[in-house]
Amino acid sequence: MHTRVTFFPVNRHLIMNNEPFHQIILPMKDRLFRLAYGIVRDREEAEDILQDLLLKLWSRKEEWHDIGNLEGYCFRAIKNMALDRLSSMAVRKTDAIEREQEDLYFVDNNSPHHAMVIKEQQLLIERCIEELPENQQLTFRLREVEGMSYREIADTLDISEDLVKISLFRARKKMKELLAGYDS
Amino acid sequence: MTAKEEIHIQDLLKRYWDCQTTLAEEQELRDFFSSDHLPTSWQHYAPLFSYIRDEQSVALSEDFDERLKVAMEQEKKGNQKYITIRIFTPLLRIAASLLLIVGMGISIFFITRQNNKPWFVETYDDPHAAIKDATYALQVLSHALQTTEEASLQTIRVIDDLNINWTALDSLMAEEITADSLAALTQEEDSLDDIGEFISDHKQHEEI
């Protein structure tokens, strides 16, 4: 595909329309953002990663039709970019904890104590998700947060539907155990 | 909350843990667990569903599209420079090859023209005038040659008059030439001065 010879390579550029970008890629931006946010846990970083990805896709229009599953490609790309960013963010941990603690004091709820408890439990859930293997973590997020079908998740992560179900089952089991343990 | 509802939720939850629920049923569970009047017996599962709800509410900041647009414009500008170079690359190649062909053509033209040019060009119309001029030129040349020949002969005569023993001189050339040995070489006293001069010149030359 890449060895196609054209006298003026730029012609292909000009003819190429931007439809896939506006019809497929841009509508995904919130999902992609949430996925990145779920990994890096930092809004600015997540937005930065998303912008990087969109610009990269925009500048490589000629490769769009070479990518079979553009949607899946985007999810995998943002996942990898977010994981790369995470490993280069050494100071992240301390920042995240400060932000979370701050949140605990400004909960808008009728019963502050109850809200505090829920917040604490949510923190535990977040930690638990972070500790999950990568496949389980992504499957859980795509199913629960993004509300995607098993088929869509399988396509996105490029794994079999069975493996999606197994990953989700294990992730939910972990959650159940965590919540049951917290309760007792 | 009725018993029927409770059984329904119980069933949903069980199927949820077994990954048997549909997306709609999972939404139903989330709605149920985030309701304000949740029975205390269900309380301990609430954090999971409220966590998911919170995660779902995470959205891009309002100005993201604007910033993306600006970044894309910048990217476009950067790309355009690249595109103009790409447009002109084939043209540059063509121009370079044309230049090469033209250069080769010009040089070949001049070389062949030079070869066609005759070495002797006829500049005289009248053959008699040509002969006259040629004779004159040869006469001048002949006169000059005669003059130099006479001068050479005179020089040879002078050297002959010196009466030098040439064979003895040749054998001596390799050795150290001294004034004593020179005396034996010359048969006449007056020629000794000339030779002495010559030898001292020779020695000076050797020193240098």
Image (cartoon, coloured by chain):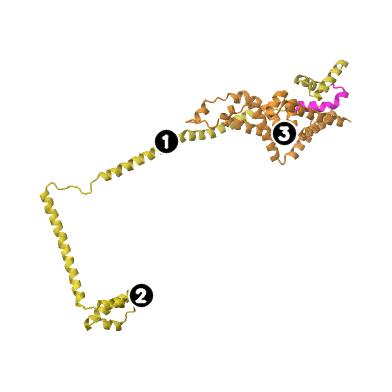
| Residue with the mark numbered 1 | B94
The residue located at (27%, 83%) in the rendering is B184
Which residue type does callout 1 highlight? Ile
Q: Is residue B6 above or below residue A122?
A: above
Q: Is residue B155 above or below residue B105?
A: below
Disc 3 to disc 2, C-alpha distance: 95 Å
Residue that protrudes farthest toward the right in the picture: A184
Q: Are marks 3 and 2 in contact (CB under 8 Å)?
A: no
For the record, the magenta segment spans B37-55
The quarter in which the N terminus of chain A is drawn is top right
> Please, which chain is the residue tagged with disc 2 on?
B
Q: Which mark is residue B207?
A: 2
In which quarter of the view is residue B45 placed?
Answer: top right
Viewer can see residue B66: yes
Color of chain A here? orange
Image position, residue B101 (x, y; %) = 37, 39
Q: Are marks 1 and 3 on the same chain?
A: no
Does residue A60 appear to the left or right of A181 in the view shown?
Answer: left
| Residue with the mark numbered 3 | A39
**Majority secondary structure of magenta residues:** helix
Q: Secondary structure at mark 3?
A: helix
Viewer can see residue B200: no
- The reply to whether the magenta stretch includes residue B20 is no
The residue located at (75%, 37%) in the rendering is A96
Which residue type does callout 2 highlight? Glu
Q: Nearer the viewer, mark 1 or mark 3?
A: 1
Image position, residue A92 (x, y; %) = 72, 39
> Please, which chain is the residue tagged with disc 1 on?
B
Provide the letter of the chain coloured yellow: B
